[in-house]
Amino acid sequence: RIVHVNGSFLPEESARLSIFDRGLLFADAVYEVTAVIDGGLVDFDAHQRRLRRSLGELGIAFDPDAWDLLGVHRELVQRNDLQEGLVYLQISRGAADRDFVQPTGAEPSVILFTQSLPLLDAPAAARGLRVITRPDLRWHRRDIKTTQLLYPSMMKSAAVEMGVDDVWMVENGDITEGSSSNAHIITVDGQLITRPLSHDILHGITRAAVLDYAAEAGIEVVERPFSVAEARSAREAFATSATAFVTPVVEIDGGPVGDGVPGPGTDRIRALYIERSRERLQF
Ligand code: PLP
């Protein structure tokens, strides 16, 4: 694989980053994951807008305008002959002697790599996800896309160890989101319910696109918190993320959602998302 480090394209074996990088020592870094289908980038501009926001919130002095990040994404996709998968981009505050006080002059580290993955025909989309609920013990700025992913990674590992697919995290009785996806339900009346944006959840790019496409298609969208009990008695439930697109959730804490199989509402929204994304790919 060809990867990108601080302005250079090189084989992954040759990539080097300082052991003093604050991304490594403090998770002092932000990232984006952009999906690739048919060799094109999905919603690149929206990911870049969120990246700017994350950088601004943490005061990481990386200027995206001084870089051609679209060009770097394109070149990585081409050099790796990537048809379907993702491009991962991470920007850390840079390397400095280990200190809790953030350095002012560090040069941000920029790394990118690709992963080839089946996204359009992902097995989980056909089968549906089984999730368990767990308390949301993450920090309270989940809207910033940092690499501080220990808790969601532990929870997802625990879920897989239990033989299911993922966790939906819960705070004050309401579902916040999945370990790496936003959570949504479809009520028996056909309303799409999703938690409103706040510091409590990541502002998913896929979530935003899905809400737009659903509203355009005449589906009623309501942004409000929903409880675990409500999700369990919903007609359908689904997760969204850049690489999962729209994936049905068919079981919560051992109980079926609706019929316990992927439902027509979710299938329709997934198809709509893929269709609209395909029309807007960037090459
Ligand atoms: N929520 C969390 C915690 C995530 O980590 C992610 C993606 O990685 C999402 C939601 C979905 O965001 P997006 O649709 O931008 O990939």
Image: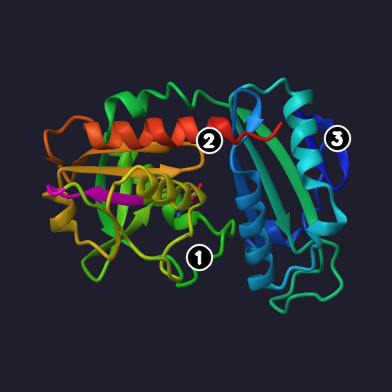
The residue carrying pointer 3 sits among few (fewer than 14), some (14 to 19) or many (20 or more) residues within 10 Å by Cα, namely: some
| Residue denoted by label 2 | 277
Q: Is residue 169 left or right of residue 75?
A: left
176 w.r.t. 68: above or below: below
Residue at point 81%, 53% (across, down): 18
Q: Mark 3 or 1, which is nearer the eye?
A: 1
Which type of secondary structure does the marked residue at label 1 adopt?
loop
- Residue type at mark 1: give it: Asp
Residue at point 69%, 46% (across, down): 89
Query: Counting residues from the N terminus, which is met first, the one under dot 3 or under dot 1?
Result: 3
Which type of secondary structure does the marked residue at label 3 adopt?
strand
> What is the quadrant of the C terminus in the image?
top right
| Residue denoted by label 3 | 9
Magenta residues, start to end: 183-189
Residue 143 disc label: 1
| Alpha carbon distance from label 2 to label 3 | 28 Å
- Residue type at mark 2: give it: Ser
The percent position of residue 155, horizontal first and vertical second, equals 37, 50
75 w.r.t. 152: above or below: above
- Residue type at mark 3: give it: Phe
Is residue 180 visible from the viewing direction of this image? no
The percent position of residue 98, horizontal first and vertical second, equals 75, 69
Taking the view exactly as shown, the residue that stands out farthest to the bottom is 101
Is residue 83 visible from the viewing direction of this image? yes
